[in-house]
Image (cartoon, rainbow, N blue to C red):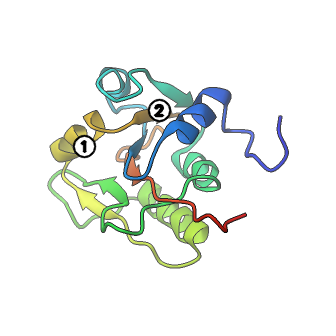
Amino acid sequence: MLKGIDPLLNADVLQALRAMGHGDDLIIADTNFPSDSVARQTALGRLLRIDAPAAEVVKAVLSLYPLDTFVDDSAARMEVVGKPDEIPPVQKEVQKEIDKAEGKSWPMLAVERYAFYERAKQAYCVIQTGERRFYGCFAFRKGVVPPDAE
């Protein structure tokens, strides 16, 4: 255990978050996402796990991980197939955690299912959660930490 670091963030996840650079994508996926096969295609090349609900994982990650302010798609969600405007409860919960972490409204971009898979394959890494609800899949693009940040 370390002070000030959410205990959900295990050593493998912390190492990956630290190694990522500006513009790298992080995928946080539910239990139904093909996480292992997709993770093998990422820069890290292996799957990371945090067995907790998606909103708890996002809260823990965003306690350390800056979102990219230079792009419109720094926070994205997988679209519901056939209902692109529908936002299921799991996505609403994650949206609340994003807004809390950023201190303002930070809407997620909707990404069509197969386009999301392709984005995930280009990501730095994939964290599979214990989220069992459908459409608990998210992409976060890493931003920068300014030199004067604490």
Name the one closer to the observer, 20 or 106: 20
Q: How many marks?
A: 2
Q: Residue at x 56, y 43 (%)?
A: 53
Q: Quadrant of residue 137?
A: top left
Q: How far, Cα to Cα, is label 2 from label 1?
A: 15 Å
Tell me which label, 2 or 1, sits earlier in the chain.
1
Q: Name the element at disc 1.
A: helix
Q: Residue at x 67, y 66 (%)?
A: 149
Checking the image for residue 3, the label placed there is none
Q: Is residue 106 left or right of residue 14?
A: left
* Residue 86 visible in image: yes
Amino acid type, mark 2: Gln
Name the one closer to the observer, 48 or 78: 48
Query: What percent of the width, then of the height, locates residue 13?
Result: 58, 33
Q: Is residue 142 left or right of residue 149?
A: left
Q: Residue furthest front?
A: 147
In the picture, the quarter occupied by the N terminus is top right
Query: What percent of the width, then of the height, locates residue 29?
Result: 41, 39
Query: What percent of the width, then of the height, locates residue 150?
Result: 73, 63
Q: Which of the two marks, 2 or 1, is nearer to us in this view?
A: 1
Q: Residues within 10 Å of mark 1 (few under 14, many from 20)?
A: some
* Residue 51 visible in image: no
Give the residue at mark 2.
Answer: 128
Q: Residue at x 36, y 29 (%)?
A: 43
- Picture layout, residue 106 above or below residue 7: below
Amino acid type, mark 1: Arg
Checking the image for residue 119, the label placed there is 1
Query: What percent of the width, then of the height, locates residue 124?
Result: 39, 36
Q: Name the element at disc 2.
A: strand
